[in-house]
Image (cartoon, grey):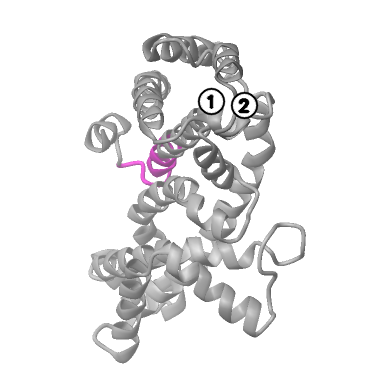
Amino acid sequence: MWAYTIRRILFLIPILYVVSTLVFFFVHLIPGDPVDAILGEQAMVSDRAALRQQLNLDEPLWEQQFRFINMALQGDLGKSLFSQEPVSDMIVQRFPATLQLACVAMIVALLLAIPAGVLASLKRGSVIDRGSMLFSLLGVAMPNFWLGPLLALVFAVKLDLFPLAGKELPGSVWLPAITLGFSMAAITSRLTRSSMLDVLQENYVKTAQAKGLSRFKVIVKHALVNALNPVVTIVGLQFGALMAGAIVTEKIFSWPGVGSLLLTAIERRDYPVVQGCILVIAASYVVVNLMTDLLYARLDPRVSLENHGKATA
């Protein structure tokens, strides 16, 4: 297990290098100039040239990229072009909010998905089963940028049940968490249903029923526990996706996380902040995937980490 873990951690280095390189060059292709955003388009040519030299924006792109990589290897993500605040400090301040939102969204998704998937498998072909599948289709089909404003309009504006935006008021997390977790719930419910249908046909479940165990014990203790093994992998992957997918949701609800920081930095052409945010999001995704693999092996001893790593690579 240790060899596998170390190999995956080392594999993280080239992934982050490729991500940082692509992001660096793509962000410089975005129309606009950070110097114009800082000084305004009416600034004198001499002032613009002096600021460009001060920010090292007059150097060739490959030199800027080399400096960024060298600093990142030392744990320094640079400074914001606007506030001159260290990017790492800005991300550290915002990351707990994004993590909180992703965790609550995952809890919401699991509370919706697992009961729906189990009930659909037990009532296969019924109205409940068809309703559960319709729920999953709606969850996949509705994008966050549409669902978020809809929930805000209904539950914040019309019914006044939750705060509309921000993080300060009690209950502020629920609307963005539901928005973020709804599509995850749809995917997870379908997988739970499929896995439960397979497990219910296994001999050990039929044996447990033949021994006279209550239906509740058969479903929960024998069927559901084993059916959740493949679900764990998808949940882990989806949690990593939640960290990245929170960008739009955070913007809709003015949630002060890494996603809203990233979008603001893109609008202002704040290159170091954009690069730092995406590096942290990419690293979080890969680390969550690694933890998911390790947890899956713990839940199912039949799984070989070596083979599982080759399958997921």
Residue farthest right in this picture: 169
Give me the residue at 42% from left, 48% from top: 241
Picture residue at 70% right of the left edge, 70% below the top = 163
Give the labeled residue for mark 1.
272
Could you tell me which quadrant the N terminus lies in?
A: top left
Identify residue type, mark 2.
Ser
Return the x and y of residue 185 as percentages of the image width and height: 42, 66
| Label 2 crowd bin: few (<14), some (14–19), many (20+), radius 10 Å | many
* Image spot of residue 302 (x, y percent): 30, 42
In the foreground, 300 or 238: 238
Q: Which stretch is magenta?
A: 290-302
Which residue matches tag 2? 80
**Sequence-first tag of 1 and 2:** 2
Image location (x, y in percent) of residue 50: 59, 13
Q: Amino acid at mark 1?
A: Pro
Residue 145 higher or lower than 309, as above or below: below
Question: Residue lying furthest bottom in this view?
Answer: 127
From the viewer's perspective, tell me whether residue 155 is left or right of residue 62.
Answer: right
Residue 228 lies, with reference to residue 150, above or below; the image says: above
Q: Which mark is residue 301?
A: none
CA–CA distance between discs 1 and 2?
6 Å
Q: Are marks 1 and 2 in contact (CB under 8 Å)?
A: yes
Which residue corresponds to the image point at 54% horizontal and 74% vertical from the top-left? 151
Q: Is residue 222 visible?
A: no
